[in-house]
Amino acid sequence: MKILALEREVPGTPADAFAPHLKAEARRAWELVQAGVIRELYFDRDQHTAVLMLECADLDAARAALATLPLVETGLITFELIPLAPYSGFARLFMAD
């Protein structure tokens, strides 16, 4: 199942709270890429928050994987999860009018 994960910083978190965890965060993200869980990883250009494309069995598996990220473990960020389904609109091109 493809799942879009949008990072949300916990309100009120000071900017300097992130720095001590960023190397460990990158390491764990790399491990999740190598495991095939994180398929794509981006930053929102304007907000500099992470946007991840995940491949997981279900939302619970996605939550469990993301919970292993140091910034999630320390309560600095959360993720909004959006389950995706294939676009079915192209079928309309082949329907009789």
Image (tube, grey):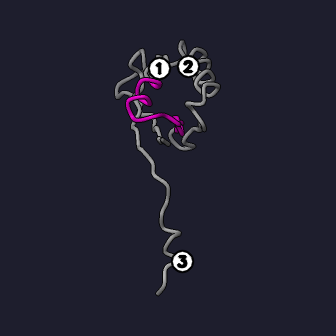
Q: Which residue is disc 3 drawn over?
A: 94
At horizontal 54% and vertical 42% (from top left) the residue drawn is 44
Q: Which residue extends farthest bottom?
A: 97
- SS for dot 1: helix
Q: Mark 1 or mark 2, which has the lower sequence index?
A: 2
Q: Mark 3 or mark 2, which has the lower sequence index?
A: 2
- SS for dot 2: helix
Q: Which residue is disc 2 drawn over?
A: 25
Kind of residue at disc 1? Leu
Residue toward you, 57 or 30: 57
Residue 56 to residue 34: above or below: below
At horizontal 52% and vertical 35% (from top left) the residue drawn is 50
Q: Which residue is disc 1 drawn over?
A: 71
**Residue numbers of the magenta segment:** 48-66
Front tag of 1 and 3: 3
Q: Mark 1 or mark 3, which has the lower sequence index?
A: 1
Q: Give the percent coordinates (x, y) of residue 92.
A: 49, 74
Front tag of 3 and 2: 3
